[in-house]
Amino acid sequence: YINSNVIKTSEKSGLYVRTTSVDSIRKNTIKDNDSTGITVTSKSIIEKISSNNIYRNANGIYVNGKSSISNITSNTLNKNGKYGIKVMEKKTTVTNIRNNTIKNATKAGVYVKKAKTLKGGKLKKLNTYKSCEKKVVKK
C-alpha cells in the first residue's frame, strides 16, 4: 500500500513505480512535481490507483512498459499539463478508468496509444472532464 502521503516538489515524478507489485495507491496528495504525478512502468502490477488528488504536475498519471493496472478510479486530476491520464504501449493494460475528475488538461483528459483499455466512447462517459482540450484521444 502507498496510502495517505503528501508528495510534492520533486524534480522528477512524484511517485515512480518500477518493476514491482502494489495493491493500492490511494488517498495521496501528489502535487507540484516537475515530471508526472504517478509513473507506473517496467512490468509493474497495481490493483488500484484511487482517491488521489493529483495536481500541477507535467502529467497526472502515466502508465507504460508492459505494466498492468486493474483500476484507476475516483481520482481528482487538475492542471497536469498535457494529459490527466496517459497510457502507452501495446502490452500495457489498464482494465478500468472510471469515476475520475479530470480538469484543465491542455491536450486530453485521457490519452491511450496502443494499450489495452476500455473503448474511447466508454472512457468519455465514465469520467468527468472540465476544461480539457479533448476528453479522450485513443490511437
Image: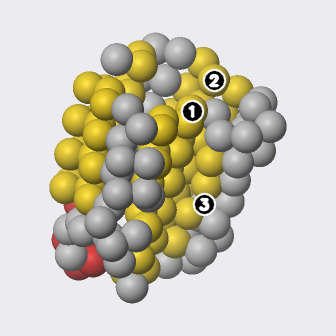
Q: In the rendered image, which residue does mark 3 sit on? A: 104
Camera-near label (1 vs 2) is 1
Vertical side of 3 occupied by 54: above or below: below
Task: Look at the numbered disc 3 and give the secondary structure of its residue.
Answer: loop
Residue 14, how many percent across, how many down?
Answer: 63, 34
Vertical side of 25 occupied by 102: above or below: below
- Whichever of labels 3 and 2 marks the residue nearer the N terminus, that label is 2
Residue 90, how many percent across, how many down?
Answer: 33, 73
Query: Which colour style is shown?
Result: secondary structure
Kindly identify the residue that appears in the image at 75 percent across and 32 percent down.
10
In this picture, residue 32 sits left or right of residue 96: right
Kindly identify the residue that appears in the image at 42 percent across and 19 percent down.
2
Q: Quadrant of residue 55?
A: top right
**For the residues marked 1 and 2, what is the alpha-carbon distance in whole angstroms?**
8 Å
Q: Are marks 1 and 2 in contact (CB under 8 Å)?
A: yes
- Mark 2 burial class by Cα count in 10 Å: few <14, some 14-19, many 20+: some
Q: Is residue 105 visible?
A: yes
Q: Quadrant of residue 15?
A: top right
Camera-near label (3 vs 2) is 2
Task: Look at the numbered disc 2 and give the secondary structure of its residue.
Answer: strand
In this picture, residue 47 sits left or right of residue 43: left
Identity, as a three-letter code, of the amino acid under mark 3: Asn
Which of 131 and 111 lies nearest the eye of the viewer? Answer: 111
Q: In the rendered image, which residue does mark 2 sit on? A: 7
Q: Quadrant of residue 9?
A: top right
Vertical side of 54 occupied by 104: above or below: below
